[in-house]
Amino acid sequence: EIAAAACEEAGVIGWFFVCTQFVDTPVAEQYDFAPAHRIKLVDENRPGERLAMTWEEIADLHRRGHVVTPHTASHALARTTLGAEDIAREVSEPKRLMDAVTGGSAPATAWLEGTNWSGESAADRAVAASGYRYVFGNTMVQRLPR
């Protein structure tokens, strides 16, 4: 609500990275989910209150011209996303969900801790195979090879 309005007032397009599993977490569990998945809370956050965006809000951001794209499902680390099931859950499924909700094609993803894309790990290969065009890291934005 606040960031999108500020972007619009400034005449810029916002890029919103969303942990899709957080969105799907019941409101009563979001306060505990956040720190368990390295999502920082602020003093104003209270147990039992909704903390994550809803899918309707995500679709609205996209309709308003902002970019909404996955930040993995659960705020995962690249180095711990190793098996096929983990990769599907953290890489492929979030893009499928985001694309279905927005009607667009989520262009980017980002790992917790901003891990750069090397193309060498199974997770990196899945990022490219899922159709992402960019990986946002802590020190760069990488355009993926087509």
Image (cartoon, rainbow, N blue to C red):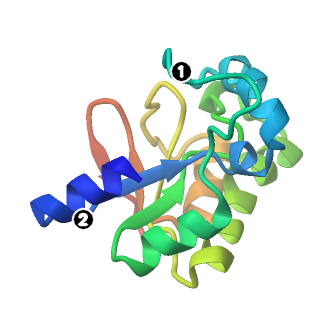
Q: Which residue lies furthest to the right in this view?
A: 85
Q: Position of residue 20 (x, y in %)?
A: 68, 51
Q: In this view, does 47 lie to the left or right of 71?
A: right
Q: Is residue 86 left or right of residue 110?
A: right
| Foreground of the two, 38 or 63 | 63
Q: Is mark 2 on a helix, strand or loop?
A: loop
Q: In this view, does 25 lie above or below 75?
A: below
Hey, what amino acid is under mark 2? Ile
Task: Give the residue at x 27% y 31%.
Answer: 139
| Foreground of the two, 19 or 52 | 52
Q: In which quarter of the image is the C terminus?
A: bottom left
Q: Across the whole image, how many numbered discs are drawn on residues?
A: 2
Q: In this view, does 6 lie above or below 56?
A: above
Task: Give the residue at x 78% y 41%.
Answer: 27
Q: Which residue lies furthest to the bottom in this view?
A: 103
Q: Is residue 47 left or right of residue 61?
A: right
Q: Is mark 1 on a helix, strand or loop?
A: loop
| Foreground of the two, 7 or 68 | 7
Name the residue carrying label 1.
Answer: 40
Q: Is residue 136 above or below residue 1?
A: above
Q: Where is residue 76 in the image (x, y as percent from the top left)?
A: 66, 32
Q: Residues within 10 Å of mark 2 (few under 14, many from 20)?
A: some
Q: Where is residue 89 in the image (x, y as percent from the top left)?
A: 80, 50
Name the residue carrying label 2.
Answer: 13
| Foreground of the two, 122 or 51 | 51
Q: Position of residue 37 (x, y in %)?
A: 69, 24
Hey, what amino acid is under mark 1? Lys
